[in-house]
Every structure is written in C-alpha cells, then in structure tokens.
Amino acid sequence: MLFVVIRNDKPNSFNLRLSERPKHLEYLKTVLDRIVYGGALLDDTGRQIGSALIIDVADKAAADAFAIADPYVDVGLFANTSVRRFRPVFEDGAWL
C-alpha cells in the first residue's frame, strides 16, 4: 500500500539537518526496500527545507512507524509531518 510522507523542517534548522544527516542516511539504508520515490523540498534559494517520500508498506500503522523511526524525529528537526495514503494517477507522462 502506498503512502506519501511529507515533512517540513522547523525554521532555521538547516544546520541541525546537516549535523544529523549521517544518522538519517544510515536509517534510510535500512528501509530502502520500502521507498518508491523520495527527495528534498527546497526553498526559493535551493536550500532543503523538508522532504517527501512515497513508501510502500502494509498499512497506515506501518507508514507511521516508518516516519517515526527516522533519527531526525528524535532531534526535533520537523515542524510537521503528514502521512497519507497515496494513489498514483500518472507515471512518466502517461495516465495509469
């Protein structure tokens, strides 16, 4: 089942993001098999201010657990996180 995890960083937290990034990347290595697509949300200058991931997990509880397990959560990087079911409609410029 697909879910989208959208996270917005707290204001002025770029240095925190950078300092904790190695732990975050180690976590992602353990869940790569569940990540369908992901990337950075950027401000107008190109600096990362959040992220979006599409994950494939069994259910909402698994999606929430995936989101909570990220080490960035423990250090308080995120202002908010949204975890929602996702239904693809387009892929590579075509209707599904």
Image: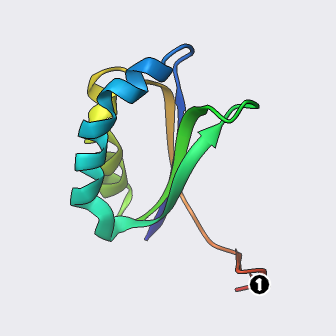
Residue at 30% across / 70% down in the picture? 33
Q: Name the residue under label 1.
A: 95
SS for dot 1 = strand
- Residue 47 lies, with reference to residue 79, above or below; the image says below
Residue 47 visible from this viewpoint: yes
Answer left or right for 5 relative to 76: right
Quadrant location, the C terminus = bottom right
In the rendered image, which quarter contains the N terminus?
Answer: bottom left
Residue drawn 36% across the image and 20% down it: 76
For residue 88, what is the image quadrant? bottom right
Instruction: Find residue 5 and report its horizontal and vertical position in percent.
Output: 49, 49
Q: From this view, report whether residue 91 is shown above or below residue 11.
A: below
Q: Which quadrant of the structure image shows residue 32? A: bottom left
Residue at 77% across / 85% down in the picture? 94
Q: Position of residue 71 (x, y in %)?
A: 26, 35
Nearer to me, 84 or 38: 38
Identity, as a three-letter code, of the amino acid under mark 1: Trp
Q: In this view, does 11 lie above or below 83?
A: above
Give coordinates of residue 67: x percent, y percent: 35, 44
Residue 57 appears in view:
no
Name of the residue lying farthest toward the top:
12
Does residue 56 lie above or below 44 as drawn?
A: below
How many residues crowd around disc 1 within 10 Å: few (fewer than 14), some, or many (20 or more)?
few
Where residue 60 sits in the image (x, y, percent)? 38, 56
**In the rendered view, does 41 fall on the left or right side of 43?**
left
